[in-house]
């Protein structure tokens, strides 16, 4: 494996970590908004 | 090929079009009339990786790298932009939340945008490593 391939793998790993951070934050924001749209459960009692 | 695509999708727990739909789409992809969507491109890569690995054992590493590249680029392309993240923040701040304070929401948004900029930087770094012909692909 060449040094260039190693460097590409390293950058891909770093990119993957940043992607995961953005995806997680966006998921939290979307979950907050989704909770606005979810119908409130009726109290069965 | 349709059967191979459906098998590869099933192995990775994904849904794909029905068999007859694939039979209709595959000739269009092969003729170049239409480009397969990214998830189908990734399935093709998976299928041909398995074939290539069987034929030339040393090829697996390079194919793995190509698949990783395709996957991270696909994920990067599907991320919202900074403006969309700001819009989500504004919507989330529009009413009081029990689970997060406004400061936490703002911090989360700032963090997301910081990482989004890092994503753009890493994509540019990748394009430079891969050569000029790859520049400009993906987002943000």
Image (spheres, grey):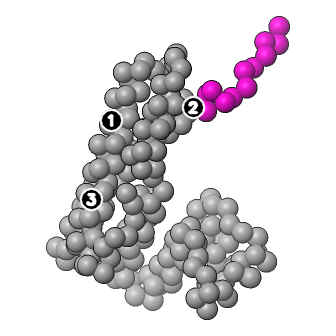
Q: Which label lies toward us, 3 or 1? A: 1
- The residue at the far top in this view is A45
Q: Is residue B37 above or below residue B53?
A: above
Disc 1 crowd rating (10 Å Cα; few below 14, some 14-19, many 20+) is some
Q: Which residues are magenta?
A: A34-45
Mark number displayed over residue A33: 2
In the image, is A19 to the left or to the right of B117? right
**Which residue is depicted at the point 23% across and 65% down?**
B125
In the image, is A14 to the left or to the right of B86? left
Disc 3 crowd rating (10 Å Cα; few below 14, some 14-19, many 20+) is some
Q: Helix, strand or loop at disc 2?
A: helix
Q: Please give the residue where the numbered disc 3 appears in the rendered image.
A: B122
The verdict on a common chain for dots 3 and 1 is: yes
Q: Is residue B127 in sight in this rendering?
A: yes
Q: Helix, strand or loop at disc 1?
A: helix
Quadrant the C terminus of chain B occupies:
bottom left
**Which residue is depicted at the point 63% across and 27% down?**
A36
Q: How many marks overall? A: 3
The verdict on a common chain for dots 2 and 3 is: no
Q: Is residue B41 above or below residue B119?
A: below
Whole-angstrom CA distance, mark 2 to mark 3, is: 30 Å
């Amino acid at each position: 494996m060449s040094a260039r391939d190693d460097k590409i793998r390293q950058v891909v790993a770093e990119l993957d970590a940043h992607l995961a951070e953005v995806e997680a934050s966006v998921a939290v924001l979307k979950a907050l908004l989704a909770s606005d749209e979810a119908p409130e459960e009726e109290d069965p009692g | 090929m349709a059967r191979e695509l459906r098998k590869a999708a099933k192995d990775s727990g994904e849904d794909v079009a029905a068999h007859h739909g694939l039979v209709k789409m595959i000739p269009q992809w092969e003729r170049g009339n239409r480009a397969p969507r990214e998830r189908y491109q990734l399935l093709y890569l998976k299928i041909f990786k398995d074939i290539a690995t069987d034929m030339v054992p040393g090829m697996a590493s390079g194919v793995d790298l190509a698949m990783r590249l395709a996957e991270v680029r696909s994920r990067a392309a599907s991320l919202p932009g900074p403006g969309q993240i700001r819009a989500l923040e504004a919507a989330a701040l529009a009413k009081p939340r029990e689970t997060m304070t406004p400061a936490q929401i703002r911090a989360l948004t700032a963090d997301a945008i910081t990482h989004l900029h890092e994503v753009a930087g890493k994509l540019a770094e990748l394009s430079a490593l891969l050569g000029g012909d790859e520049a400009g692909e993906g987002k943000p």
